[in-house]
Image: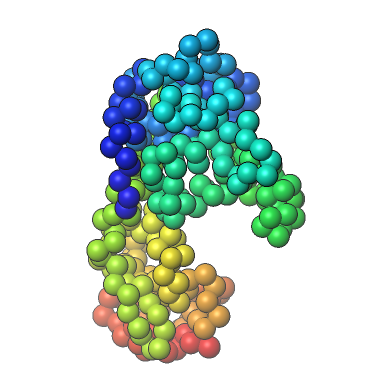
Amino acid sequence: MSEPREEAVRLLGGVRKIVVHGGLAHMDDIMSCAMAYAFGVPHDAPIERRNPQPGELDDLATLVLDIGGVHDPARLDFDHHQRARTDEPKCAFRLFGEWLGVDDEMRQICPWYTAWNDVDVLGPFQTAKRLGVSSDAIAGLICNPLGDWIIRRFADDPTLRRKLTITLANELDLTRRCWRGMGSKVVAREIAGLPVADFTNCLSEEISRCSEAWVAQHRPACLISRDSRGEGYSLLRCRDDPRLDFSRCAGKPYTLFAHPGGFILKTRTRDVDFAAILGDAKI
């Protein structure tokens, strides 16, 4: 886990208001504000949705995000709309994360970070083309009623705006702390000739928030954790690994549940032989 730059955190501690654009809200201005609160801006600093006034782009007590036509971290101005189309796609929260020194960490542990950066800067059609999928497919992923509700409330309700954003900031902080706490608990093992990630010493919160990032980085075939619903273990096939099919374990004495899709197995107890289970599930 990378620590934000001390000078950046010091400057953010002196911010007394955040200015973002008005009109339709986007994930960029919302998450830029959340990152600001998470990395040092006092939580009583209001978020004002409008164009910056004369002098505010030079005012270190005013953090300007996703508006203003200026990217100048020394003055706490983080807009990206003036950047050339040929520049690497970087939205406001990405520019802000780079200045803080946490961009690599954010890209690693937050699945939304890179995807939403691309959507904001390139738009859904160019992002779909870049990912090699149809624009209809990506529209179905980025449009959802919960996200739409958050965006509309951020835009329309000043009181709820700050509460929502601080909640997102706290969630981000918790995810970063879970990533740090999980690092020393995960054990990489080889069982039945397969790379396995043993998460049995991790908390459920750590697993739910950070296991996907750990799997993406280390590429195990299987993740083992304590079953949060029962008395046994949960074995998850990682990234649809073609070497495993847990549906082959259906009906075994150790099996409480084997998903027909073959991607998850739950054991009845914790008195099990993982080598035997993975041996049964191997293709």
Give the mark count: 0
Q: Is residue 45 visible?
A: no
Residue at coordinates 41% horizontally, 28% vertically from top-left? 74
Q: What is the residue that sits farthest to the top in this orientation? A: 54
Q: Quadrant of residue 230?
A: bottom left
Q: Position of residue 77 (x, y in %)?
A: 48, 26
Viewer-proximal residue among 226 and 85: 85
Q: Quadrant of residue 227?
A: bottom left
Residue at coordinates 57% horizontally, 22% vertically from top-left? 68
Residue at coordinates 25% horizontally, 65% vertically from top-left? 185
Q: Position of residue 95 (x, y in %)?
A: 49, 38
Q: In the rendered view, would you say 109 is above or below 26?
A: below
Q: In the rendered view, would you say 14 is above or below 27?
A: above
Q: Position of residue 108 (x, y in %)?
A: 44, 55
Colour option used:
rainbow
Q: Position of residue 157 (x, y in %)?
A: 51, 19
Q: Is residue 173 left or right of residue 156?
A: left
Viewer-proximal residue among 59 and 106: 59
Q: Is residue 216 visible?
A: yes
Residue at coordinates 40% horizontally, 63% vertically from top-left? 214
